[in-house]
Every structure is written in C-alpha cells, then in structure tokens.
Amino acid sequence: MHTSQTARTVNTMVDPSPPRVDPPSGARINWMRHASARGVLQQVTSAFEERGIPVLPVKGIITAHALYDDVAARTIGDIDLRVSRRHFRQVARIARSLGWSTQTPGPVLWQTVLKVGGWEVDVECTLGPPGLCALSVENLIRRARRCVEPFGFPHLQPELNDHALILVINAFKDGLYPMPWALEDLRRIATHEHFDAEIVVARASEGRVASALWIVADWLVEAHGAGEWRAVRDRIGSHPPSARVARTYGYVHRRGWPPKPGLLTTAGSADSPFGCASGLALALTGIVRGRCIRALRKVSRPST
C-alpha cells in the first residue's frame, strides 16, 4: 500500500510519523526460514557426525531444493532428521551436553524433538511407527549421497526413491490427512526425472509396506488427480496385497483418524503377520511408557 506523500515546509521539518513498512510476503518469510534452518542443520549434523553418528535430513529441508524451482515456494515448519536406532540414546546425551533441550512428543518409541536455535528438530529412528517398515534408517543411509550443495557444507541426501517412500509412509501415518505442502511434495516427487515406480514398489515390498504404498498411491490418483502415481499403484496390483491392512485402515480413516486408534492401525499395517504383531507390541509399549512418564511427572511435582 502506498502512503500519500507528506507535504513538507520550507524548513524541511521531519514528519513525526514513521514510514509504513509492509510486512514480508509469505514467500519472503519462507526464504528467511529456509536460510535459518540451513544454519541449524549445519550445527546439528556437524555435532553428531563429528562423534561418528551419520544424520539423514529428510522432508521439507531437502524437498524444497530437490523438487521446487524456488525454495520459498515450500513452507518449512521444522527440521526432520533420521538416525540409526543404535545411536538414539547417544544423540540425546550429545544434545543435552550441548544445551539443547530434548522432548518426547508422544507415545512413539525412538523419537525425540530437539530445541536448537529456536527450531524444533525432529529426530526419528524408524520409517513410520516402529515395526511398520522392515527397512531401517541404516539401509537408507547406505544408499544416501554425500553432497555439499545446496547448503554449502557436507551432508547426506536420501536417494530419491527412498525419499518418496518416506513421504508415502508419512502420509499413511497421518491417516491421509497431510499438510498441504506434504501433499505437494508427493505430487512433485513422482514427476522427478529420477523417480522410478518399479524401484519404489520394490523398496516397499522389501519393507513389508506394499499395502500402505498402494493405499497412498490410490488416494493420490483418485482423490487428487496425481496420475503419476497410477504406475505405482498398478505395479502392485488391483488392490492392496493385505486385505487386513486395507479393511482396518479404511475403517479407522472413515472415522476421522482418532490419535490412539490411528497409531495402532498404522503400527499394525505391515503386510506380514509377524510385522503386524511386532508393530502393535511396540506401539502399545510406547503408549504405556508415555502414561508412566506422565504419572511420574505428576507425582514429582511439588505440592502447592
């Protein structure tokens, strides 16, 4: 908005009211946030990798550069990292030694949130809830590339088809209610020159999550017109490999994806019965642990 030019007297008195400054646009804010996130990413990855812990950045901080012509077009709310499960406790110790707070945000095992430089850094050690996907973070780290660009410092970047599966599992975990930018990432990654439907399906089959992949691909095609995902769905077949997963997931999704049933449904959605049992056991363990932690906190609070 343009303000009217203030009439000035001969003695050039200064207008006592300050000039109007328009707030930054959404794109400008996104650009500034990405610039800030880059510094925090360097700080965190350097701290862990200097101590022998490989760190794999995923989701928005990577997709903004890999899938968009302008990073400012991609909203970023936090920084997502994956580390090996065997390093989880060490990551928490290092974070605390550096003065970063650590929080356990929910009942899912092997997840923590670090507070670093005003950012939430989500650290996870599995693909989806523990027990869902048989692929490990270590599998993904072995296939990742070490790059310098676009951040200007050495870091790992996930192989594109691995990253596509991460995005799929994230949408599946969220009950097909993803944030708009997460949906856009899914649309765009399937149009990337290195996206290969056959590889994505093979990785999902190896990870026992082909049914989850089918459900997400079908949703993208039918609900969002993302025709690029049709090749993925059709390579799996005319329906999900596991009727159990399809029925349970559909039932809970139609009821709005309540948090606890949603977690248990996702955790038990591996294609194999063993994976289903393992995921449910780990999810229940996490729920019980969360309740115990809350109870201990109430008991330890000083009475007023």
Image (cartoon, rainbow, N blue to C red):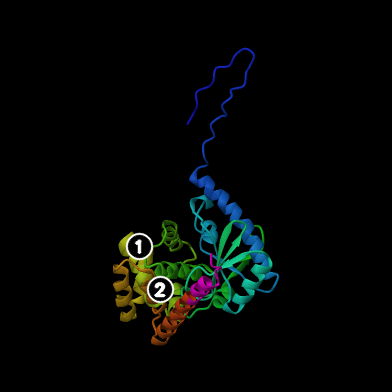
Number of residues whose C-alpha sits closer than 10 Å to that of mark 2, classed few (under 14), some (14–19) or many (20 or more) = many
Q: Residue 255: percent from the left, percent from the top? A: 29, 68
Give how far across and how far down residue 97 sits, in percent: 68, 68
How many neighbours does mark 1 have within 10 angstroms: few (below 14), some (14-19), or many (20 or more)?
Answer: some
Q: Which mark is residue 263?
A: 2
Q: Is residue 165 left or right of residue 52?
A: left
Residue extending farthest right: 50
Horizontal side, residue 163 vs residue 262: left or right: right
Residue nearest the viewer, comparing 71 with 292? 292
Q: Is residue 297 above or below residue 77?
A: below
Q: Is residue 248 above or below residue 67?
A: below
Q: Give the magenta part as a residue range.
A: 292-304
The furthest residue to the front: 304
Marker disc for residue 151: none
- What's the residue type where badge 2 is placed? Leu
Tag 1: amino acid: Gly
Distance in Å between CA atoms under marks 2 and 1: 29 Å
Magenta segment includes 245: no
Secondary structure type for disc 1: helix
Q: Quadrant of residue 119?
A: bottom right
Residue 30: x and y, percent? 52, 50
Q: Is residue 151 visible?
A: no
Question: Does 296 lie within the magenta span?
Answer: yes
Q: Position of residue 91 (x, y in %)?
A: 63, 72
Report the front residue among 71 and 293. Answer: 293
Label drawn at residue 227: 1
Q: Marks 2 and 1: which is nearer the front? A: 2
